[in-house]
Image: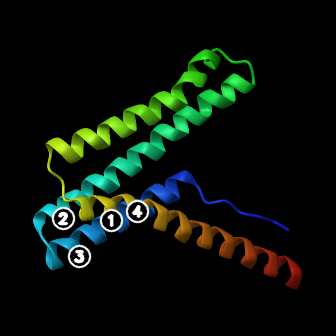
Amino acid sequence: MNWRAPSIGAIQRTTALLTVACAVLMLIADSRAAAFGCLVGGALMIGNLFVLTIVGRAIVALAQGGGAGQIGVLLAPLKMFVFVALVYVLVTTAHLDPAGFMVGALTQFVAIFIETWRASARGASVRLEDQQA
């Protein structure tokens, strides 16, 4: 069985598109505050995945005995702490709409499902072409 995995870039692009689409819908159906919260939530998730790839590389370097080894062990919990603190500060000081923020944050999960489906569909079409040849 040939499994295909979605790329981080594809997930990021889909998240951005979904975030903007949801923000426009929230602007039309709800309010500016909800749309802004949606944009902030989506942007935060895009940033989180970007930082997660950096942390993942540092952890792989640790496993391979690279120079970033000691830092890699500390980066994962530090990233989570900074992420939680940033969300707290944004929600409390910027007075973001909680529903809009959650919709924006959830766009990345939807994007992961969409991109996984697309990657598996591409893999299935390649296998069908191989069988027909």
Nearer to us: label 3 or label 1: 1
Task: Name the one closer to the observer, 115 or 102.
Answer: 102
Task: Name the one closer to the observer, 13 or 52.
Answer: 52
CB-based contact (under 8 Å), mark 3 and mark 2: no
In the picture, residue 69 is in which quadrant? top right
The local secondary structure at tag 2 comes to helix
Q: Residues within 10 Å of mark 4 (few under 14, many from 20)?
A: some
The local secondary structure at tag 1 comes to helix
Mark 3 or mark 1: whose residue is earlier in sequence:
3
The local secondary structure at tag 4 comes to helix
Residue drawn where x is 19% and y is 59% of the image? 97
Q: Which residue is mark 1?
A: 103
Q: Whole-Å distance between the Cαs marked 3 and 1?
A: 11 Å
Q: Which residue is mark 3?
A: 25
| Quadrant, the N terminus | bottom right
Mark 4 or mark 2: whose residue is earlier in sequence:
2
